[in-house]
Image (cartoon, rainbow, N blue to C red):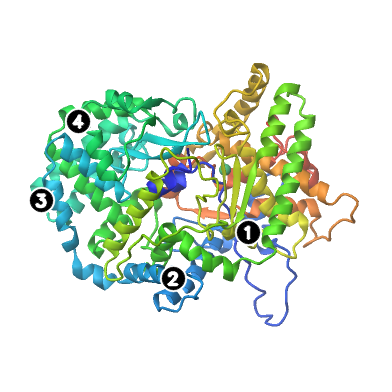
């Protein structure tokens, strides 16, 4: 279900995809001043190490202290790390391809090269966007002015959702939790502007300040759109109150991680019964869905609140709310004049990112092209930047990690025979996708207008929405990818029981050809072990080998698991991220289990791969197993602005970089042995947690 949200509301993707490990490091700069000397390919950045830090006291400071001391966060970034460097490198490579396409010079085999080029050119045409102002929005404004009854409201909601903006709720195709082979419709809580319900509800000075800032922002944006001052002020207040009323009914991100809690199958009459006052037929027609037969009304209390709000909110408030969300969606894509974009940047910078400058236009446009036309531009990317044998090498590494989990399952003392058999079946059934899709998406039906970003954007969003909605009621398509090939990331889908590693992450220093196996196991092997462990984390374990939500655990073994998970929850709940703000041990539980399990599996796979072979050479005086841990730690070398760090504690299911390293390693006796750490050292926890 998590992958489902990716296309529906792109802005949600990063956080909605709890599946995602995310990652690190670009290639290291070649030796300075030694032009013709080829440094050995090590995959370890020796300059990133702080030799003054003690690995047994704070391994993150040891592995990354040098890097952190020598890198500033670029002004357009909220966070900067080795992982972001690789993302930035891939974005630069995409830019070359996009500029060629925009100049009509894409390769003949790129059948959608012209569309990609036109889209990028439209996005880059800042002067054109400035000139047209809001002229192209007038027709939409006129339609919104006509919203006055349930039918016209539902039609407007459908139309706006079709353009990728999740007003009122989120709607789209999802795999049935009870039968993973078929697609049904999912209805989820949504429709807020701030990144989490907590921002509306939490009663403390920081959040009160954010709400004040949001109200001023809302008012300013409505004003820029031509709403007279007094009315803008009134509308901003009304929109805010409406969103706050929705937020009150929303479940927390932690609650949304519980698959049993968010599965409420219904037929159409059942859905209509839950939402009196909402005109579903008008909505389905406008959003472009054949009225579905089966739904997951995932968050019933949010639907109940919606019904209540439909009964008492005046049409002018709905109109203001919808107008605001149209602006919000467009400004996020930078399809509005600069005054809007600057105001939006000021708001997000002040409250959520801390970035000092707006991202250069080309970066934004390369990113937008990738997120909307990723399978068109991705073809050229993999041809040019994905080595032919990388797929086989990645597959060999994955198999090693899978074998390690097979061995691990055999010997886990807290498993019983029945659960062990089921777990082994699930492991054996995991599917792997590596690099890029076997069949690429067909964009023939999509019309891109080079002279208008706004029109192109709406067309591309509508194309994606339609593609998603067309899946409802059909068998699942197991060939589909939920990340583009250039993405520096990976995911595990519990319902497809598959792991996916795009070409974008199979690059140095995640995968460094020629580096020691120790290093590649510590970096990409860790990612693979992490994704694999998601199949067995507190959420993934609830799905069986076929991807159905089913209880396959003996009650006593499930209890053993929960006890071990509770240890991890306690451990991370103590970690301070910024000021006095601690990690949410429940929200980050699945990722933390995956980090610890992933490292253990990758290390076991490394040892098995070297059985009977001579030890690999030292690098910078570090033994192979020390290299393994250095590679794993350096994946996370990063600096984060405090605003961004605070927002991530609320919204991100992943722990912050320091704790993604020190958290798992302080539970690993193999780490302590590699660096000679003793009981009593900070990197050796007195209460050792271990799940897998
Ligand atoms: Zn993950």
For residue 618, the mark is none
595 shown above or below 564: below
Question: Which of the marked residues, 3 or 1, is nearer the chain's N terminus?
Answer: 3
Callout 1: SS: loop
Foreground pick, 440 / 324: 440
Residue 310 circle label = 4
From the image, tell me which residue sits under label 2. Answer: 113
Q: Residues within 10 Å of mark 1 (few under 14, many from 20)?
A: many
Point out the tag, 2 or 4, that comes first from the N-terminus: 2
The residues tagged by marks 1 and 2 sit, at their Cα atoms, a distance apart of 24 Å
Residue 229 tag number: 3
Which quadrant would residue 590 be assigned to in this image? Answer: top right
Q: Is residue 601 left or right of residue 476?
A: right
How far is disc 4 from disc 1 in space, using C-alphas? 49 Å
Measuring from the top left, give residue 586's x and y in whole percent: 52, 31
Sequence-earlier tag: 3 or 4:
3
Residue 535 x/y as whole percent: 62, 36
Residue ID at (31%, 58%): 459
């Amino acid at each position: 279900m998590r992958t489902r949200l990716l296309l529906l509301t792109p802005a949600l993707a990063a956080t909605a995809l709890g599946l995602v490990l995310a990652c690190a490091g670009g290639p290291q700069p070649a030796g300075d001043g030694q032009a013709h000397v080829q440094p050995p390919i090590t995959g370890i950045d020796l300059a990133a190490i702080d030799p003054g830090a003690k690995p047994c006291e704070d391994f993150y400071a040891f592995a990354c202290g040098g890097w952190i001391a020598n890198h500033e966060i670029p002004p357009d970034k909220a966070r900067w790390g080795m992982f972001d460097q690789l993302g930035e490198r891939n974005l630069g490579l995409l830019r070359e391809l996009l500029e060629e396409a925009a100049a009509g010079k894409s390769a003949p085999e790129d059948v959608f090269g012209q569309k990609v080029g036109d889209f990028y050119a439209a996005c880059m045409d800042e002067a054109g966007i400035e000139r047209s102002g809001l002229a192209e929005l007038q027709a939409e404004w006129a339609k919104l002015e006509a919203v006055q009854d349930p039918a016209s409201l539902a039609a407007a909601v459908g139309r706006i959702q079709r353009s990728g903006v999740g007003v009122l709720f989120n709607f789209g195709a999802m795999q049935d939790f009870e039968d993973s082979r078929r697609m049904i419709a999912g209805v989820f809580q949504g429709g807020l502007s701030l990144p989490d319900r907590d921002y509306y509800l939490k009663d403390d000075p920081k959040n009160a300040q954010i709400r004040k800032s949001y109200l001023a922002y809302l008012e300013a944006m409505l004003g820029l759109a031509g709403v007279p001052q007094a009315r803008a002020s009134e509308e901003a207040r009304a929109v805010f109150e409406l969103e706050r009323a929705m937020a009150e009914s929303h479940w927390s991100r932690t609650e949304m991680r519980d698959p049993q809690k968010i599965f409420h199958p219904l037929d159409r009459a059942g859905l209509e019964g839950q939402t009196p006052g909402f005109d579903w037929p008008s909505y389905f027609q406008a959003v472009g869905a054949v009225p579905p037969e089966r739904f997951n009304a995932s968050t019933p209390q949010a639907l109940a609140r919606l019904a209540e709000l439909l009964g008492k909110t005046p049409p002018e408030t709905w109109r203001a709310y919808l107008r605001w969300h149209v602006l919000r969606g467009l400004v996020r894509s930078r399809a509005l004049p600069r005054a809007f974009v600057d105001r939006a940047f000021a708001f997000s910078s002040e409250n959520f990112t801390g970035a000092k400058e707006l991202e250069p236009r080309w970066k934004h446009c390369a990113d937008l092209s990738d997120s909307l036309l990723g399978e068109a531009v991705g073809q050229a990317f993999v041809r040019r930047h994905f080595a032919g044998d990388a797929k086989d090498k990645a597959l060999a590494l994955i198999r090693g990690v899978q074998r390690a989990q097979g061995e691990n399952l055999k010997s886990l003392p807290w498993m019983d025979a029945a659960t062990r058999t089921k777990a082994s079946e699930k492991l054996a059934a995991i599917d792997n996708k590596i690099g890029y899709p076997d069949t690429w998406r067909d964009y023939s039906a999509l019309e891109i207008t080079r002279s208008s970003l706004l029109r192109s954007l709406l067309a591309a969003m509508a194309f994606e929405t339609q593609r998603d909605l067309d899946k409802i009621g059909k068998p699942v398509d197991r060939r589909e990818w939920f990340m583009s090939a250039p993405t520096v990331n990976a995911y595990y889908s519990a319902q497809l029981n598959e792991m996916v590693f795009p070409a974008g992450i199979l690059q140095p220093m995640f995968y460094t050809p020629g580096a020691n196996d120790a290093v590649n196991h510590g970096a990409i092997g860790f990612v693979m072990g992490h994704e694999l462990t998601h199949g067995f984390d507190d959420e993934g374990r609830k799905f069986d080998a076929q991807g159905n939500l089913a209880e396959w655990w003996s009650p006593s073994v499930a209890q053993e698991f929960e006890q071990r998970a509770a240890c991890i929850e306690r451990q991370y709940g103590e970690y301070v991220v910024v000021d006095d703000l601690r990690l949410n041990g429940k929200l980050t539980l699945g990722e933390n289990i995956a980090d610890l399990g992933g490292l253990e599996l990758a290390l076991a796979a490394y040892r098995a791969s070297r059985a009977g072979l001579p030890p690999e050479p030292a690098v910078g005086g570090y033994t192979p197993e020390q290299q393994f841990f250095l590679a794993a730690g350096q994946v996370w070398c990063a600096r984060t602005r405090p605003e961004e760090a605070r927002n991530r504690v609320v919204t991100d299911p992943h722990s912050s970089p320091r704790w993604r390293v020190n958290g798992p390693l302080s539970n690993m006796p193999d780490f302590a042995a590699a660096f000679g750490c003793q009981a009593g050292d900070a990197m050796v926890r007195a209460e050792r947690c271990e799940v897998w």
